[in-house]
Amino acid sequence: MKRKPFIAANWKMNKTNSEAIQSAKELALLTKELKQERDVIIAPAYVSLLSVYEVIKTSDIKLSAQNVFFEKDGAYTGEVSFDMLLSVGCSYVIIGHSERRHIFNESDEMINKKVKASLNYNLNPILCIGEKKEERDLGNTFEVLDKQLKKGIDEVDFTKNVDFIVAYEPVWAIGTGDTATALQVDEVHKFLRKILTQYKGTSFADKTRILYGGSVTPDNIKELMQIEDVDGVLVGGASLKAETFFKIINY
């Protein structure tokens, strides 16, 4: 089944507000020349969401947040709610990124709450999963991914019209320059599609786009996108320059 390519930029903790605006302007201009069908998403820091949205709202680029909290409101200093994200133009939200899991100790249970809440608020979730180097070296890759994916979508009601995305990001490949081989990516994405089929049914698995993330560059994007079950990419460092990211979009 052919799924529309989904190319997402995660700017992480980079770019001041003025830098984010400038990058968004450059990217909006470049994507006007895009001939292929693509979903293009950028995820700036919280402080730049509204400013970036004002730049891209008339373009085909969609806005994503890098994280969210699952409660509606309350005494949660430093957190941001779904209503807040919707109010500044977000269409997507990244949930469970490895840096949230391993630096900020987010659990599978917390990530599951965020996925459930995202559907309740009609904000499209990008659920990130991935194994650490020691887990792969021990041969535990599939066990880790099975647990993260199943717990992430456990008891989630997918009957609502929400665009649910899975992003496979091997932790050992994020920002290291080490990209998983085509064979490694192929076997993992096939495995994830199989798990989605077993857990949520064939129709759900067929329509769910599975992204690869981990040192994606203009040099390896073509090979990655030729893999059958790779439906797009989640790009970190290579998305920080508009021209470089556009080369990935326009692979």
Image: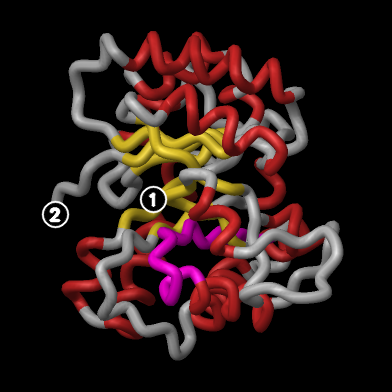
> Residue 157: percent from the left, percent from the top?
36, 84
Above/below status of 5 relative to 56: below
Which sits earlier in the primary sequence, circle 2 or circle 1? 2
Query: Within 10 angstroms of label 1, few (less than 14), some, or many (20 or more) residues?
Result: some
Q: Report the mark closest to the observer, 2 or 1.
A: 2
Q: Residue furthest bottom?
A: 155
Q: Which residue is mark 1?
A: 186
Q: Secondary structure at mark 2?
A: loop
Q: Is residue 122 magenta?
A: yes
Instruction: Name the secondary structure under disc 1.
Output: helix
Q: CA distance from mark 2 to mark 1?
A: 15 Å
Q: Quadrant of the C terminus?
A: top left
In terms of depth relative to the viewer, which is nearer, 199 or 159?
159
- Residue at the disc numbered 2: 1
Which residue is nearer to you in this view: 234 or 20? 20
Residue drawn at the location 48% of the way across and 69% of the way down: 118
Q: Is residue 179 visible?
A: no
Which span of residues is magenta-colored? 118-131
**Residue shown at 71% from the left, 38% from the top:** 47
